Amino acid sequence: SSELTQDPAVSVALGQTVRITCQGDSLRSYYASWYQQKPGQAPVLVIYGKNNRPSGIPDRFSGSSSGNTASLTITGAQAEDEADYYCNSRDSSGNHRVFGTGTKVTVL
Amino acid sequence: QVQLQESGPGLVKPSETLSLTCTVSGGSISSYYWSWIRQPPGKGLEWIGYIYYSGSTNYNPSLKSRVTISVDTSKNQFSLKLSSVTAADTAVYYCARENYDILTGYSYFQHWGQGTLVTVSS
């Protein structure tokens, strides 16, 4: 079982803001990275570190962290943001990588 | 632009060994951590393990007894072997490059292959 827990599904109205959370003890010590995955496609990195976006990722995506929880926020969600989102960080030992359970985001 | 491409059999028999290769183009395999990640149909992502270009490895404890990851720097390739497979190993297998910044501690999978479906069935 994953050591990083995410809500299975969230929905957001077009143009509104949605926050996706990732909980795990290791997040007190390590940053999370976030990935967007659309059906039939490989995951795409959207946020890493404290709050860094790779080139080409819209600035409506942002990241934050507090205690044992990392968050990905989409401000002004667009139809194309409908996807599965996964966090990734270390496990509780700090030695291995682990993915969160994933959150399906639906844009209404 | 770095590109990764997985290759290998799409069908493996139960109890046999799954073998995949990832070819890296547009950049050198030297430096960086090179990972294998899988996703069973309809399920989430699972990190399998990584190899550093120097050859050091790190595996998911749940798969460690069955996994071997190796690297061939002369071919800019790294490979995955998973032994004694069962139907539970049926998944899309991705290779990915992990960036690790020792100064900030940031680590993240910046580049991914397109993935290859491996089915375990007799």
Image (tube, coloured by chain):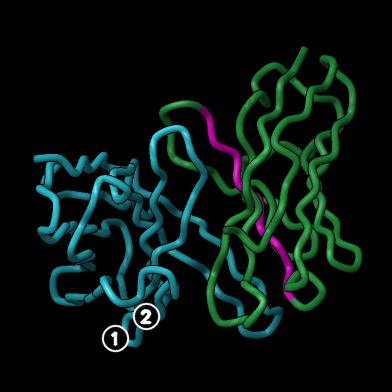
Residue named by callout 2: B52
Residue under label 1, please give it. Answer: B55
Provide the secondary structure element on which disc 1 rests.
Answer: loop
Question: Quick check: A22 left or right of B99?
Answer: right
Parent chain of label 1 = B
Q: Kindly identify the amino acid type of the residue bearing the numbered disc 2.
A: Tyr
Q: As shown in the figure, which amino acid type bears the numbered disc 1? A: Gly
Q: According to the rendering, which colour does chain A have?
A: green
Number of numbered labels in the structure image = 2
Q: In 3D space, how far apart are the residues under numbered discs 1 and 2 (Cα atoms)? A: 5 Å
Q: Residues within 10 Å of mark 2 (few under 14, many from 20)?
A: many
Where in the figure is residue B109, as x and y percent of width and height?
51, 59
Relative horizontal placement of residue B112, taking residue B84 as reference (left or right): right
**Chain label for disc 2:** B
Location of residue B118 by image quarter: top left
Q: Position of residue A64 (x, y in %)?
A: 85, 56
A15 or A21: nearer the viewer: A21
Nearest the eye: B2 or A4? A4
Magenta highlight range:
A30-38
Q: Colour of chain B?
A: cyan
User: Which quarter of the figure has residue A32?
Assistant: bottom right
Residue B26 placement, left or right of B40: left
Q: Is residue B37 left or right of residue A9?
A: left
User: Image point 43% across, 69% down: which residue?
Assistant: B62
Q: Residue at (12%, 41%) from the top-left corner?
A: B11
Q: Residue B83: horizontal and vertical position, in percent?
A: 18, 66
Q: Are marks 1 and 2 in contact (CB under 8 Å)?
A: yes
Q: Residue at x 21, y 57 (%)?
A: B85
Instruction: Name the image quarter holding the N terminus of chain A.
Output: bottom right
